[in-house]
Image (spheres, helix red, strand yellow):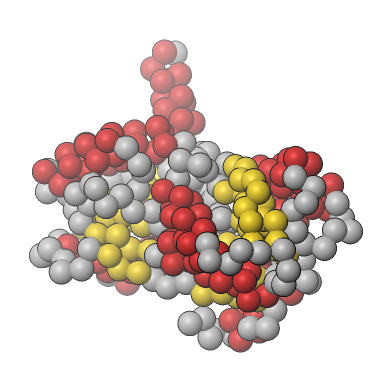
């Protein structure tokens, strides 16, 4: 009974999708350690990685905590190092513990890549993903371009401790710093959930009724911001910039509920990360940062974006 309880607890704690060992006929066994296993954004990363893995005869193991939790992510990362997979692709996590696990993996001959969020201070082999500072700058520049007069900005961020969120916020601040008419009045956390983003928006507008613009820095924030605004001030004119290109976000742009979103390319991140990891099996890389692009999407260019003109 105790043994069975331990197994159930371990499964529910880590939500490891596949426990089977990679069959011998595969070329390599890679692991993709996500921030949150069923998050829509990370499923897109997995989709791209799985496509590349299938093309190159690679066994890909996709794992992650049921909800965003750095401690659980780090336990999973350490576990992948312990079972000696051929390579690990993971979200970067700030702090010495992450750096120590990455060092342990590299010392055991396991190349480790970061995606989505980088930790440059670690010995990870390379980062594949968005230039998050630049993406934040795009959010600031689009607000400058598409608003007039004084703007009082409320920001919804996925997690205060997430490096990519910090970089996007820094980029946004950098873009608006010379524009005296735009002011950040408050920042609340959504915990990368739609419900959390709606609550953060409600709280921001309750605390700062002067807010005229909202910026969301993680994938579900834009959708939640629309819900929160509808709850507290449905008739308030609000400029909204979201992040990522989830189908519902794009539909809200089409409907005029969100003004713009910053597109990044999670499928491309996953696909490219597998290709880079294959190269790392043979030799080190010359590049330590491989950026996958970012773009402002609004109602003006949405149709072209959906037709595949994504750059």
Q: Is residue 239 visible?
A: yes
- In the image, residue 9 lies at what x, y percent? 46, 24
Check the image and name the residue furthest to the right: 235
Q: Is residue 238 above or below residue 88?
A: below
Q: Nearer the viewer, residue 125 or 261?
A: 261
Q: Nearer the viewer, residue 20 or 199?
A: 199
Check the image and name the residue furthest to the top: 2
Q: Nearer the viewer, residue 203 or 30?
A: 203
Quarter holding residue 302:
bottom right
- In the image, residue 264 lies at what x, y percent? 49, 68
- In the rendered view, does 110 fall on the left or right side of 146? left
- In the image, residue 113 lies at what x, y percent? 27, 55
- In the image, residue 4 lies at what x, y percent? 43, 20
**Residue in the image at 20% along x and 56% along y:** 125
**Residue in the image at 17% along x and 39% along y:** 104
> How many labels sit on residues?
0
**Residue in the image at 29% along x and 39% along y:** 98
Quarter holding residue 134:
bottom left
- In the rendered view, does 246 fall on the left or right side of 136? right
Give the quarter of the figure containing the N terminus: top left
């Amino acid at each position: 009974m105790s043994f069975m309880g331990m197994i159930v607890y371990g499964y529910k704690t880590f939500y490891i999708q596949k426990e089977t060992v990679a069959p011998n006929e595969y070329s390599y066994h890679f692991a993709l350690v996500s921030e949150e296993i069923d998050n829509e954004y990370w499923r897109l990363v997995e989709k791209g990685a799985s496509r590349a893995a299938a093309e190159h005869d690679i066994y890909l193991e996709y794992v992650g905590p049921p909800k965003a939790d750095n401690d659980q992510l780090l336990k999973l990362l350490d576990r992948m190092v312990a079972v000696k997979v051929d390579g690990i692709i993971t979200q970067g996590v700030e702090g010495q513990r992450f750096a120590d696990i990455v060092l342990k993996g590299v010392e055991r001959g396991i190349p480790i890549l970061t995606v989505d969020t980088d930790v440059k201070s670690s010995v990870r082999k390379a980062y594949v993903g968005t230039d998050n500072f630049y993406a934040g700058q795009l959010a600031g520049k689009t607000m400058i371009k598409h608003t007039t007069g004084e703007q009082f900005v409320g920001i919804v961020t996925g997690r205060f401790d997430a490096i990519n969120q910090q970089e996007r916020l820094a980029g946004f601040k950098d873009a608006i710093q010379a524009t005296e008419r735009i002011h950040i009045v408050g920042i609340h956390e959504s915990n990368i959930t739609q419900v959390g983003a709606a609550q953060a928006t409600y709280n921001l507008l309750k605390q700062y009724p002067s807010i005229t613009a909202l910026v969301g820095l993680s994938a579900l924030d834009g959708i939640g911001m629309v819900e929160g605004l509808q709850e507290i001030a449905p008739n308030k004119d609000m400029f909204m910039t979201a992040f990522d290109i989830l189908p519902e976000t794009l539909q809200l742009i089409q409907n005029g509920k969100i003004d713009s979103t910053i597109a990044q390319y999670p499928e491309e991140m996953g696909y490219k990360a597998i290709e880079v990891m294959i190269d790392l099996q043979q030799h080190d890389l010359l590049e330590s940062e491989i950026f996958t692009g970012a773009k402002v999407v609004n109602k003006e260019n949405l149709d072209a974006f959906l037709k595949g003109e994504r750059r």
